[in-house]
Structures are given as C-alpha cells and as structure tokens.
Amino acid sequence: DAGVIQSPRHEVTEMGQEVTLRCKPISGHDYLFWYRQTMMRGLELLIYFNNNVPIDDSGMPEDRFSAKMPNASFSTLKIQPSEPRDSAVYFCASSSDSIYGYTFGSGTRLTVV
Amino acid sequence: GESVGLHLPTLSVQEGDNSIINCAYSNSASDYFIWYKQESGKGPQFIIDIRSNMDKRQGQRVTVLLNKTVKHLSLQIAATQPGDSAVYFCAEGRNTPLVFGKGTRLSVIA
C-alpha cells in the first residue's frame, strides 16, 4: 500500500484565491481526518469523516473552509477565499478506527501571500 | 476545553544517552495515549501506545510510562541515536479523534 497520499506537497497562492487540497486514504480505512499544523497551535483537527460522511466539523475555522469526501478513496479540503493566516501544513490521516492506528500523509505546505 | 500539553518544547541529548520526553494531559476520561514521531517534511508516525489500564509499555528502545494520578505521560528512548532527532507528539483519545500536544523537538548531539 502506498499509504495516505496528499497533493500537492507545496502550494503558494495569493490572498483571495481558492485553494484545494487533496487526499487519498488507505484502501479499507473508513475514517478520514484533516488536521492543520502550525507552530503556535500544533496539530488541530479540522474535520473527520466516517464512511464518507462528515461526523464533526467543529474544528473548521470558518465558512471559508469546506471539506468533502465524495467516495471512499478521495477527499478534498477547500479554502475560498484564502488568507495569509491560513498558511500552515495540512495533514490528512486515515484509520480503520476513530482513535487507533492513524496513518498520516506527508502533508501539504500551504503559503498564502 | 481540555487539552494535551508538553512540559518542554526542546530537548538536546548526547548520542548514546537516554532521552525522556514528557507530556501532561488534562482529560481524566481519556483511556488511550499515543506517541508520534515527526521528521522534517513528513507526517507524524506512530511510535508506541498505551491504554489507561497499564502503567508501562515497552517497545524496541522505547518505553511509555503513564501516571494517571498526576495525568502524566512520558516517552523514554534508550541509547538515543542521530536518527531519533525529530519532533515528538503525545496524543490522547477516548472514542473520539485524537487530540495532540504541541510537540517536543529532540536534537541528538553527535
């Protein structure tokens, strides 16, 4: 298995632009998590899905953030419009359980200028 | 809300010495604890875990200790090697997604 695959690895965009981050979970994992990592706040859970259904999106900062999981093998995290304070590393993780055995992707480093 | 935190943000250790990384947690209901290692440019990787019905668990060169009385978790790395240089996170959970601490950076001095 190739593990959790995220794309792009790096994204630099101008303030106000739309940004879409992508994640392919490990096949057979029915939990998918989006985390954001910053120096100040560490790893924060944004949203998680179970069987493609969003379960808890209370960590999503504001309406500019949205996430979808149209099928078991793909999820997106969209920011529209992007702002400089959104600059961070965004990680996707998948698991077969809500707390056990998380496998993280390599992350997307987002820079909004 | 309740959160997981760390005592030390950075730790420098001589190669070959033992390392101890500490973590405090505040949610007494948590029953599962994990340590992750994150190398530069990579996502966190699982190191070792422990359930609340245990006080100690050992892996290869790593040991996790859990003190529920003072809500303290520690990771011990024996004979620290240069490849151990990374950021280490503790995380806690109970039926809900893991909550991570901010991390401790371990630097190994050759």
Image (tube, rainbow, N blue to C red):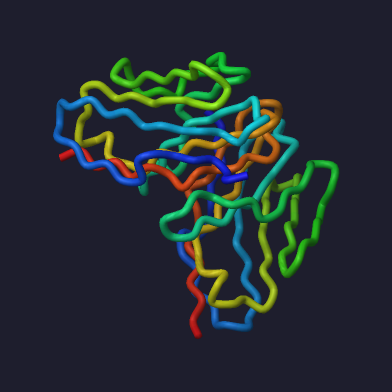
Residue beneath the point at 54% across and 77% down = B82
Residue in front for this viewpoint, A44 or B11: A44
Q: Residue furthest front?
A: A1
Residue A85 % position (x, y): 24, 35
Which quarter of the figure is the N terminus of chain A placed in?
top right
Residue A79 % position (x, y): 29, 25
Residue beneath the point at 15% across and 26% down = A16
Residue in front for this viewpoint, B73 or B42: B42
Residue A24 % position (x, y): 51, 33
Residue beneath the point at 59% across and 77% down = B81
| Looking at the image, residue A87 lies above or below residue A34 | below
Which quarter of the figure is the C terminus of chain A placed in?
top left
Residue in front for this viewpoint, A27 or B109: A27
Residue beneath the point at 36% across and 49% down = A39
| Looking at the image, residue B68 lies above or below residue A32 | below
Give the side of residue A40 with respect to residue B52, left or right.
left
Q: Quadrant of residue A94?
A: top right
Exactly how many numbered labels are in the figure? 0
Q: Quadrant of residue A42?
A: top left
Give the side of residue A20 with respect to residue A102, left or right.
left
Residue B60 % position (x, y): 75, 66
Give the side of residue B57 with respect to residue A67, left or right.
right
Q: Residue furthest right?
A: B53
| Looking at the image, residue A26 lies above or below residue B107 | above
